[in-house]
Structure formats: C-alpha cells, structure tokens
Amino acid sequence: MVQFGRRLVEERYPEWREFYIRYKELKNALYAEREDIAGGEKSGLFMKTLDEEIKKANAFYVKTETRLREQLDILEEEIKHEKNGRRAVQVGEEANRETLRA
C-alpha cells in the first residue's frame, strides 16, 4: 500500500504543485516538536510550519476564487448582452410583422 505522503505527491495537480500543503515538512516538524517536548523544550516549529502552509493554501484559494469570479462576471456580461441582442431582434421582428399586417 502506498504511503499517504507519497500518494499525495503523486496525485497532485502539476500546475498547483507549489500551493499544496507540504505534508512531509509538517510531519518532520511534528516529530521535531515531539522530541523537543520530550527534552523539556517547546520550539513551536510545528505550529509555525502549519501556519505558513495554511497561509500559502489560503492565498492560492483567494487568488483562484478572484480569477474565477472575474471570469464569471465576464461570462454573465456576455450572456446579458446576448439576451439584449435577442430581444432587439425579437422586437424588430414583431414590428415588421405589425407593418406587414397593416
């Protein structure tokens, strides 16, 4: 069975590689923290590493959400213009039919 960390690396989306949480670094920081505590110290290395990884992932999420929102706004505007164009054509066709009836 493939280990979780290896599988995480193997299955990640290549274009987003730099934004993934670095599982191995977190695991190593946790082990180091555990050793520090056993030795009577508390370095805070794990929490510092975790905080950095969360900030990195969150920044990626916000950036991606902003980009997608901008794309959605553009598409919605295009749909709005398309609908307005169809209405103008429909109104023109109705006016032509009225003219023909008269």
Image (cartoon, rainbow, N blue to C red):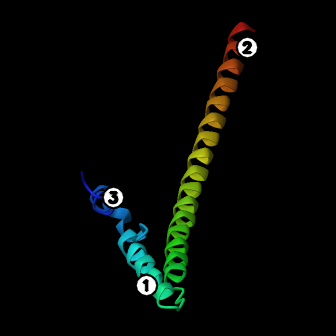
Percent coordinates x, y for residue 18 in the rendering: 38, 71
Real-space Cα distance between discs 1 and 2? 87 Å
Residue at 73% in and 14% down? 98
Q: Quadrant of residue 86?
A: top right
Q: Which residue is mark 3?
A: 4
Q: Which residue is mark 1?
A: 35
Left or right: where 67 falls relative to 94: left
Residue nearest the viewer, comparing 10 with 98: 10
Residue nearest the viewer, comparing 52 with 24: 24
Eyeballing the image, is 40 above or below 81?
A: below
Q: Which residue is mark 2?
A: 98
Residue at 33% in and 63% down? 5
Asked if marks 1 and 2 touch (Cβ < 8 Å), the reply is no
Percent coordinates x, y for residue 24 in the rendering: 35, 72
Q: Given the image, on which type of amino acid does mark 3 rest?
A: Phe
Q: In terms of secondary structure, where does tag 1 sit?
A: helix
Q: Residue furthest top?
A: 101
Q: Residues within 10 Å of mark 3 (few under 14, many from 20)?
A: few
Q: Residue furthest right?
A: 102
Q: In terms of secondary structure, where does tag 2 sit?
A: helix
Asked if marks 1 and 3 touch (Cβ < 8 Å), the reply is no
Residue nearest the viewer, comparing 8 with 37: 37
Eyeballing the image, is 11 above or below 16?
A: above
Q: In terms of secondary structure, where does tag 3 sit?
A: helix
